[in-house]
Amino acid sequence: MQSNSNSDGHSPAKWFFTVDDQRFPAPRPLISEAIIRAQASVPADRVIVRDHNSHIAQQLAHLGFLRYVIFDEDRIEASNLNRLIGGTQADVVAKRLKVEIASRLITGVRPHAHVEMIPERWQKRPDQLKGCDLIFVCVDGYDQRRQLEGIARRYLIPLIDIGMDVAMPEGSAPEISGQVILSMPGEHCMTCMGFLNEMSLEKEAKKYGDAGINPQVVWSNGALASTAVGIAVDLVTGWSRSLRKSVYLCYQGSVGTLKPHLRLDYLPKGPCPHFPFAQLGDPKLRPL
């Protein structure tokens, strides 16, 4: 990032960002070619919310994030083309791995990016999460969210969770709902916010809502993913100059709104009781 200063020494008159030795005007210095290790974590089951990953990967690449670890054991199917950014009919015919599509999407924008593709469930290689600076959670299972948040808290990694559902109540119009949650170490967790509770954990075994085999959700995926990326940029750059604490935004697709959840007004006082700082780091076995 480079700037031109005014002759009177005040704030810069014009900002530029540099890509491959070419300068482009920018409204203000939001982010430069920072080398960030970004973790996109996707579910093992065939659920819609995994495809938030493609939106996030694309936007992070355009912003200049250069190091990624991406989990996904699945291969693209024809039903994914209505939401998987970067996926093509040729990929369907070739039965290409989704991590390969994500890597192609990223390196097409940033040829020097390092993308570690892991076509497995994240639970098989959880140590890969330790070296990440950000964890994006795009899973369907509530229990997986709880596990990933536990890892993020143990290693003091900010975690950004996104998800959505499609409900089709009898006699009423369909509704799309979703959430974007920032879980910061030391701040309120998803259990404190009421998103994770015994009722939600019971939904683990359920399939993804009522949407069926071929839901049209690419626009709502994009809205949620863009918001998550915006939070990540704020964490990295501090451009909004606001202290990031608990973030819980709820999405209503029928009216196109994304606003703070009412539960934020009823958060428990004091530090998060579910992830005390005494539980930081690798667990150690002690003789009895």
Image (cartoon, rainbow, N blue to C red):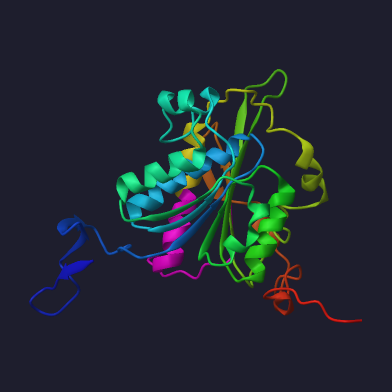
Tell me: 28 left or right of 179.
Answer: left
Return the residue nearer the eye: 184 or 257: 184
Residue 222 place in picture, x, y as percent? 46, 40
Residue 59 place in picture, x, y as percent? 39, 48
Tell me: 13 left or right of 197.
Answer: left
Return the residue nearer the eye: 103 or 261: 103
Q: Residue at x 24, y 58 (%)?
A: 27
Tell me: 193 left or right of 184.
Answer: right
Q: Which residues are magenta?
A: 227-249
Q: Residue at x 48, y 25 (%)?
A: 92
Residue 61 place in picture, x, y as percent? 36, 51
Residue 150 place in picture, x, y as percent? 70, 63
Q: Residue at x 63, y 57 (%)?
A: 125
* Vertical relation: 22 (above or below) 165: below
* Residue 256 visible within the image: no
**Residue 240: within the magenta?**
yes
* Residue 110 visible within the image: yes
